[in-house]
Amino acid sequence: MGDQEYDGIWFGGGAAGRFGAAFLKALGGRPLIVEAHCLGGECHVCRCAFENFVADQASMAELMRRYSGKSWYPEIDLSNISMARAVETYRKVGQKAFADTMKHQTEIQLGIEVAWGEGSIHDKNTVEVNGKIYKGRNLVIGTGSRPTLPRIPGIDLPGVMTYKDHPEIRKDPKKMVIIGGGKIGIGKAAMFAPFNVDVTVLEKCTCLPNWDQDVRQYVARDFKRRGIKIFEGVDVKEIRGRGRVEAVVAEVDGKLMEFPCDAVMVSVGLTPNSEVAAKLGVEIGARNEIVIDEGCQTSIAGVYAVGDVAGPPYFMAIARKRGMIAAKNIMGQNARMDDTLPLPDHIYLPPLEATMVGLNEEEARKKYGDVVLIQVPWGPSPRNPKPEEYVPGYENLGLPVCGRMHTLNLLYYGQGMNGLVKAIVEPKSRKYVGFHSVGDGAKTAFQYLSYLLKIGWTVDQMADLHEIFLNAEHFIQLSRLIAGQKELRGFAVQSGADRG
Ligand code: COM
């Protein structure tokens, strides 16, 4: 290897490129990152970090609305709250601060070389940036993905946006239509609604199709209560407007309907940015992704693809892990993606959030027949509970959400606003097969629950852990309540009732 040659040129300094390059360096290799905009990719600009910020602001707004004038809270006037002002704060400080951190961490702390500028790939060993040629033994493409834009008339009208435009909002929408009820669309609906935005979600098939039925039902009820409308089985025909979006026209139950709006958020999926690699002749798949093997190697030796550009799952952890795997392989190891580790998933539902890992109940019943549910709330709900009212005789209804602010959800006891906890267990082996939660703060636990699923963690092992009570997900204490059962049947066997 010549002096000027890198072990790996990472084309794109997003999550996959940054973590991959860091790993390569840690293994003794010499990486170069080529990046035009900012290290860390879209995360802090308009995705994970940004969404986390917005969801947090939306949670505050929603809780203020709920608590206004109740218990010890004063009446709070929310008529002037503004999503545009919230994102302005992020734009002014958050985006820049995160960008600085990424730059400092990468270039100074880790000493990784970065060629700043729009690069072009000449061949698999040669990249040009600002007229300078860089040579590498390996090329790693990590150019990310972009929101998929369906071919609908009017898609280019001002006022039509995607997640990328969310931080750029300068004026609050009044009526927003969200096209697509996946995790991004549902999350955006829950983020905009607390800011006095009238939100309608139009979904072609079913919202959140892979999620557990109880979580989906929770979201449906919660949205209904909050006035967020959901239409499923909808075929969007057109976005209408003279010079700016004014309505979405869609076929619903065989009838054409018009949904007036002043903003449209399109969230129908992601398309990998693979065009940059086309001239190398790497295989491109049906989703426009660069096809890779389990070692992140493309169809051409010495060319790797990492992160979203290599197709789903589009998940930060996968992007970073793909980067790490490519780095190991460049350094002569034989690293493979471990697909035995279940991938958790998460949706922002301010003031709460939903998290899952493993099988949902339907999948678990299909696979194992009978399953045991460790679940709260569990059993019937009171008919017409009123705020600030205790309804006697209903166990568990106030339990799931025990985060700091949410303890005041006691005001809404029995009203189905406190989230849910659900673990699914295969009774013969006593092993968990899935965990689900709607709550606040539980996602941290799911990072580790994923590994417990992989190693076949049992109810009995869970009952041996040390919970820090009160906690965000309750799996330890709820499991302990039934772990003594010789033949595992859940709560029903103890109460004598069969309500599970
Ligand atoms: C986080 C992006 S903002 S990265 O994964 O740390 O590069």
Image (spheres, helix red, strand yellow):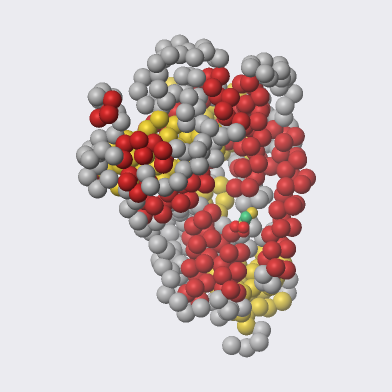
Residue 138, x across and y down, in percent:
54, 77
Residue shown at 52% from the left, 59% from the top: 319
Look at the picture and state if 74 lies above or below 152: above
Can residue 159 be spotted in the picture? no
Quadrant showing the C terminus: top left
Residue 167, x across and y down, in percent:
69, 42
* Quarter of image, ligand 1: bottom right
- Closer-to-camera residue (486/44): 486
Look at the picture and state if 283 lies above or below 318: below
Is residue 360 toward the left or the right of residue 176 in the image?
left
- Closer-to-camera residue (419/304): 419
Res 440 → quadrant: top right
Res 474 → quadrant: top left
Look at the picture and state if 420 lies above or below 321: above
Look at the picture and state if 387 lies above or below 193: above
Residue shown at 61% from the left, 47% from the top: 47
Is residue 207 toward the left or the right of residue 194 in the image?
left
Residue lying at the far right of the rendered structure = 92
Residue 393, x across and y down, in percent:
39, 16
